Structure formats: structure tokens, C-alpha cells
Image (cartoon, rainbow, N blue to C red):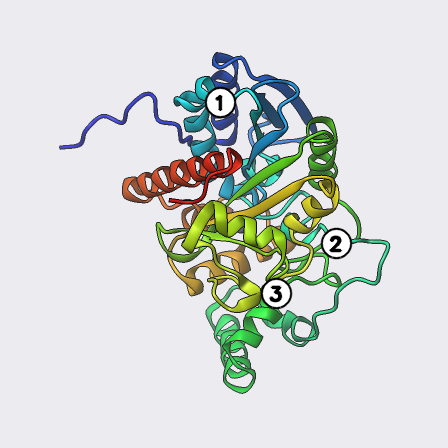
Amino acid sequence: MGIDIPTNDPFSREYDEARQKFLEAARTCAARVRHWPHPMAGPRGEALSTDSAWVGAEDASKVLVVISATHGVEGFAGSGPQVDLLRGPVPAALPRDTALLLLHAVNPHGFAWWRRVTEENVDLNRNWVDFGQPLPTNPGYEEMREHYSPASLDAATLARHEAAIEAYRTSQGVHAERVARSTGQYTDPLGIFYGGTGPTWARRTSESILAEHLGRAKTVAVVDMHTGLGPYGYGEPICNHAPGGARVQRARRWWGLSVTEPLLGTSSSQEKTGLTEFGYERALAHADIAFVALEYGTFGPPHGEHALRDDAWLWRHGDPMSREAQPIRQALRDFFYPPREDWREMVLWRARQIYRQALVGLAGGEAR
Ligand SMILES: [Zn+2]
């Protein structure tokens, strides 16, 4: 016998339901809402938009920013805590000098279509490079690209490519293989972890939102919601600011001992190029900021690798609207948004803790 799902569930089953819940919650706490319409539609013809909500005094100098759906489909996990934050006690209890800025669905196309990437097949979290400079290179990816994006998903083909990947791990090491796969690449527009050749719609929209709202901010805490790496249900605050610098020290003061650093090898993630935080560092150079990716673990590497491989095949060689697409899309969604109550409870609990710590930190306190 089951129990009824509460009707006030902050999580959603589709992008447009998530959007509706977010806008409704924002209205209820008198947020200043702006819509940033996307030029394309979702799979059921639904309108796509990034939406921003500012809660608090117009001239607040301290701001907690929460971002969802940098990686499209991960927006299911990121949107729920944003809605929960708006519905909870925080908006009414904000100090006079402090505001919330929530960016809902910064990659709405990926969210609605259950993809990690944008409509340009770009990993938004590799897209924040300075395109005026020579682009990062990834020799390991060049060597392995045919194995990461096979032209066919039949068992014999997959076995051959998996064996090549395993051989690379044996000869070069597990870390080198992860760098080759997922640090970022700028040469293969239909491949995985592609950073693009210019700023995507999603990046440009985020930059517009930052320019509109944070030009005068003095202290900014940013939490970018992610899923897919680390132990099941655990939310890891990953910090990619320069090791030893003022920003990472600030992140440690605010979020304490849980903070990990890929560049020091303490994280479930490794070094990456074109990360969102690098763009925020540039756009918010006038402010004291600390940025963490709040990364929730799901089912472990092979499942995610296979889900992303199959998704890349589908959009390169298949038809995303076909019957054969359905299990591929569902597997990707289930990997990045496990259909389980316990996982969602862990996501919500940890998000509340991370947001509370950020607000304590903005008020001058330290993590506890
Ligand atoms: Zn992510």
C-alpha cells in the first residue's frame, strides 16, 4: 500500500511544471521576477524560458545566488530546492542588506528535453572560456573521441569501444582517462563535454541576469546545483577558485569542512575548463564572491558514462522523438534525477543546510 504524494512537493515531473511552481512561489513572496524567453520550444511544444527571481531590498549589497539546470536535466534536482527556499521561512527573514537571486533553468532547452547539454550540444559548464584567447586543448579526448561517441549502439561495437577505453585507463591511468573524457573539448561539436566556439544562449542570458542584478553587489555567495558525481544522495560543495586564494578561503569560512577542491584532488570532480565560476569571477570582479557547485551523487560512473554516450548517439544519429529514443532519454533522466524519495529528501535537506550556511556567511558568521 502506498502513501499519497504530498501536493506541495517542490519537485516536478516536467520542466513546465517546475517553471510553474517556481513562478508561483516567487509571486507568493513578492519577488521581482523577470523572464528570459528562449527561442526554441520543448518536446511538447511548451515555451522555454530562464526565469530570475530577486527577493529582498533592491539595493541589498549581499546576495545569495542559486542556479538550477546549468546541466539541463539536472534542473529537476536543482529546481525543487529553489522552490523550497522561496516557500520556506527565509524570504521573510532576510536582513535588510541581503537578497536572494534565483536563476531558474539557465539551460531550459536541456531541462525540457532531458539533456545535460544546451540546444547547441554545448556543455554550459565548459562554455565560459574567453573565446578571444586560444581555446584549451585536450589531446586525450582527440585520441579517444571515436570511443566516447560510437556510431552504433549494437553490443559488439560497444564492447570494442569499452575495451579501448579500459586499455587507455590501464596504460594512462584512471585520472588521465577522466580528463580526456570530461575536462572539456572544443573540437568535436557533436561529441561529449563540448565547450562550444562562442558563448551559448544560456551563457549570454546568465551574463545579462548578472549585469541586471549584481552590478552593485558587494558580497555574493553562489550555489550552482548539479548532480551525477559522488556518493548516492550526498551533496558535495565543490570549489574551483584558485587554490589558496581569497575566494576559496571565503568558501571554507562559509561552507566549512565539506568544501572540496578538484585542483587539490580532494573532490569527486577533476580539473575542468570553461567552468561557470570562472565566468562569475570575471563578471563579479567588483565583489567578494565564493562559488560552489553543489554536486549530488547518484549511481556511479559507468551508468553516467553510458547514459551520456547513448544520448550523444541519439541526437547525432537517431531521432529524439522516436519510440527507440524513449529508453535512452529515460535512462539519462534517471541517472541525473533518481526516481527515489530517499534521494530527493537528501537533496532537499542538504540544500537547506548549504543555503543556511551561505546566509550565515554573508552576515559575517562562519560555518557551523
Ligand atoms: Zn552538472
- Give the answer, above or below, for where 51 lies relative to 333: above
Tell me the number on the disc at residue 333: none
Whether residue 152 is visible to the viewer of this picture, yes or no, is no
Circle 1 is placed at which residue position?
94
If you read the primary sequence from the N terminus, does the residue marked by circle 2 or circle 1 appear first? 1
Count of numbered marks? 3
User: Which amino acid type is shown beneath numbered disc 3?
Assistant: Ala
Say which quarter of the image contains residue 242: bottom right
Q: Is mark 1 within 8 Å of ligand 1?
A: no
Query: Image point 58% across, 25% down: which residue?
Result: 46
Other residues around mark 2 within 10 Å, as few (<14) / some (14–19) / many (≥20): many
Tell me the number on the disc at residue 151: 3
Q: Is residue 7 left or right of residue 126?
A: left
Where disc 2 sits, the SS reads: loop
Q: Nearer the viewer, mark 2 or mark 3?
A: 2
Quarter the N terminus occupies:
top left
Where disc 1 sits, the SS reads: loop
Q: Is residue 310 left or right of residue 342?
A: right
Q: Position of residue 218 (x, y in %)?
A: 66, 34
Other residues around mark 1 within 10 Å, as few (<14) / some (14–19) / many (≥20): some
Q: Position of residue 357 (x, y in %)?
A: 44, 39
User: Which amino acid type is shown beneath numbered disc 2?
Assistant: Val
In this rendered view, identify the residue nearer to me: 296 or 283.
Answer: 283
Q: Position of residue 28 (x, y in %)?
A: 47, 13
Q: CA distance from mark 2 to mark 3?
A: 29 Å
Where disc 3 sits, the SS reads: loop
User: Which amino acid type is shown beneath numbered disc 1?
Assistant: Leu
- Give the answer, above or below, for where 205 lies relative to 241: above
Query: Image point 32% across, 44% down: which residue?
Result: 343
Query: Image point 51% across, 31% down: which residue?
Result: 15
